[in-house]
Amino acid sequence: QVQLVESGGGLVQAGGSLRLSCAASGSFFKIKDMAWYRQAPGAQRELVAAIDSGDTTNYADSVKGRFSISRENAKNTVYLQMTSLKPEDTAVYYCNVRDAAYLRYWGQGTQVTVSS
């Protein structure tokens, strides 16, 4: 059983910053890929940023230059630093990890609300 615990969401004004964290615990094979997704009301869940075991990163066009994903392998933790936030960034943000057995796990989600 794997638990992904997310933290760092909240309410922020446009132009502000937030840092999300997601820590994995429990029994799993070595974590390979880590990512953040988000889902706004009435919209599909979309990939925001991803980082693989070689620290190669990938970002959605809408967040390039504003968001930064990083990981701390010793703590099985992934971070999402969000800057210059916009109202359209408002969504529930979900952590997702894939382990060496190609099993994927999801966090419970953390709400990010950006006011104009």
Image: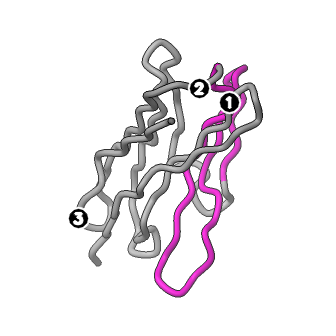
Disc 1 to disc 3, C-alpha distance: 32 Å
Image mark for residue 11: 3
Instruction: Specify the amino acid type for callout 3.
Output: Leu
Side of 54 where 4 appears, left or right: left
Magenta segment includes 68:
no
Give the residue at mark 2: 28
Mark 1 Cα shell of 10 Å, populated few (<14), some (14-19), many (≥20) = some
Mark 3 Cα shell of 10 Å, populated few (<14), some (14-19), many (≥20) = some
Q: Residue at x 46, y 75 (%)?
A: 88
Residue toward you, 12 or 25: 25
Image mark for residue 99: 1
Q: Position of residue 86 (x, y in %)?
A: 41, 68
Residue toward you, 113 or 21: 21
Disc 1 to disc 2, C-alpha distance: 7 Å
Instruction: Specify the amino acid type for callout 1.
Output: Asp
Residue toward you, 3 or 56: 3
Instruction: Specify the amino acid type for callout 2.
Output: Phe
Specify the segment rendered in magenta: 30-59
